[in-house]
Image (cartoon, rainbow, N blue to C red):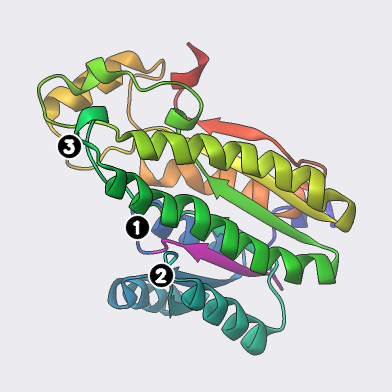
C-alpha cells in the first residue's frame, strides 16, 4: 500500500487519454503528467495532440502523441499494441474522446445517430476491451470514463434559449450508456484488480453565447460553469491509489447541477 504522501502519485504509471487535444483532454493529460504518469495522448488530430505533448515535455513531464480514430478498429488495435510494445504496460485508460453529430431530436438523422454511436459506444467498447486485457494480465489498472450530466439527467433545453444550441439525442444516449458500462466493468473486472469509475462533468465555459452562459450559471448551484482545471483533481483521484477501494461510482463534477 502506498504511503499517505504518495496516494496521488502516478509515478511508474502509463496512462492513455483519448481525445487528448480536446477541451477536457488537455487538462486531464496535464493533471496525470503532473502527478508523475507517462501520458499517451491520443486523438484524430495528431498535430494538435503533438503540440500538447511537446508542451508537457517542455515542462519536464513524460508524454507521447499518437493518432487514434475510435471509429476505426484497426486504429484502436495499433494504438494499444504500440503502447504495450513501447512501455510494456497500460495502467490507466481515460475514455475522454467524444463525437457529437446531429441537432435536436427531429433534426438528427439515423446516419447522425450511427456516427455518434460508432465512436462513443463501439469505439469506447473496443479500446476498453484492449486496455482491460493488459490490466487483467497485470492484475491492476484504473479505467476512468468521462461521461456528462446529460447521461444522468435529461437536458434542460431552456438554458439554450434562442441561441441555436442544443444537445443531440445520440450524445445523451451514449453518455448514459457509458455510465452503465462503467458499472458493468467494475463488477466484471474487479476480481482481477481492475477498477472502473465514471466522471460526470458539467458544461465547460468556453466562448459560448452570453445568453446561454448566463442561463447556465443561474441554473447551477455554484453559479458558474466548469473551468478546465476543475476536472484535474477528480481524474487524478480516480486514476491513482488514492481511490484504490473505489470502483463502480459515478462522480459528478458539475457545480451541483445534478443535485437538483
Residue 40 x/y as whole percent: 52, 73
First in residue order: circle 1 vs circle 2: 1
Residue 18 part of the magenta segment: yes
| Observer able to see residue 256 | no
In this figure, which residue is indicated by the disc labeled 2? 69
Q: Nearer the viewer, residue 75 or 65?
A: 75
Check disc 3 and report its element: helix, strand or loop. loop
Q: Do the numbered discs 1 and 2 sit on residues whose CB atoms are within 8 Å?
A: no
Q: Which mark is residue 208?
A: 3
Q: Do the numbered discs 3 and 2 sit on residues whose CB atoms are within 8 Å?
A: no
- Determine the residue positioned at 89% across, 52% down: 191
Q: Residues within 10 Å of mark 3 (few under 14, many from 20)?
A: few
Q: Is residue 94 left or right of residue 158?
A: right
Q: Which mark is residue 158?
A: none
- Determine the residue positioned at 44% across, 20% down: 257
Q: CA distance from mark 1 to mark 2?
A: 14 Å
- Determine the residue positioned at 66% across, 63% down: 129
Residue 119 x/y as whole percent: 43, 56
Q: Nearer the viewer, mark 3 or mark 2?
A: 2
Check disc 1 and report its element: helix, strand or loop. loop
First in residue order: circle 1 vs circle 3: 1
In this figure, which residue is indicated by the disc labeled 1? 22
Residue 16 part of the magenta segment: yes
Q: Residues within 10 Å of mark 2 (few under 14, many from 20)?
A: some
Residue 117 x/y as whole percent: 42, 49
Query: Dividing the picture into quarters, in which one does residue 89 lie?
Result: bottom right
Q: Is residue 147 left or right of residue 92?
A: left
Q: Residue furthest front?
A: 110
Q: Residue furthest bottom?
A: 85
Magenta stretch in the rendered image: 12-20
Q: Which quarter shows the N terminus? A: bottom right
Amino acid at each position: 500500500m502506498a504511503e499517505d504522501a504518495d496516494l496521488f502519485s502516478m509515478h511508474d504509471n502509463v496512462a492513455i487519454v483519448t481525445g487528448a487535444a480536446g477541451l477536457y483532454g488537455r487538462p486531464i493529460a496535464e493533471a496525470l503528467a503532473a502527478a508523475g504518469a507517462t501520458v499517451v495522448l491520443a486523438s484524430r488530430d495528431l498535430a494538435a495532440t503533438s503540440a500538447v505533448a511537446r508542451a508537457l515535455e517542455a515542462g519536464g513531464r513524460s508524454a507521447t502523441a499518437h493518432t487514434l480514430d475510435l471509429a476505426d478498429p484497426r486504429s484502436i488495435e495499433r494504438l494499444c499494441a504500440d503502447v504495450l510494445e513501447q512501455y510494456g504496460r497500460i495502467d490507466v485508460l481515460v475514455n475522454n474522446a467524444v463525437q457529437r453529430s446531429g441537432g435536436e431530436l427531429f433534426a438528427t438523422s439515423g446516419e447522425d445517430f450511427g456516427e455518434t454511436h460508432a465512436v462513443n459506444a463501439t469505439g469506447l467498447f473496443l479500446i476498453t476491451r484492449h486496455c482491460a486485457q493488459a490490466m487483467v494480465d497485470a492484475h491492476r489498472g484504473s479505467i476512468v470514463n468521462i461521461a456528462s450530466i446529460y447521461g444522468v439527467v435529461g437536458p434542460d433545453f431552456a438554458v439554450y434559449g434562442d441561441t441555436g444550441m442544443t444537445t443531440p439525442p445520440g450524445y445523451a444516449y451514449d453518455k448514459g450508456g457509458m455510465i452503465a458500462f462503467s458499472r458493468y466493468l467494475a463488477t466484471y473486472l474487479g476480481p482481477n484488480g481492475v477498477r472502473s469509475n465514471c466522471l460526470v462533468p458539467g458544461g465547460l465555459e468556453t466562448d459560448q453565447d452570453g445568453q446561454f452562459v448566463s442561463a447556465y450559471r443561474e441554473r447551477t448551484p455554484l453559479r458558474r460553469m466548469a473551468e478546465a482545471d476543475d476536472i484535474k483533481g477528480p481524474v487524478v483521484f480516480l486514476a491513482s491509489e488514492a481511490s484504490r477501494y473505489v470502483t463502480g461510482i459515478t462522480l459528478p463534477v458539475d457545480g451541483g447541477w445534478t443535485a437538483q
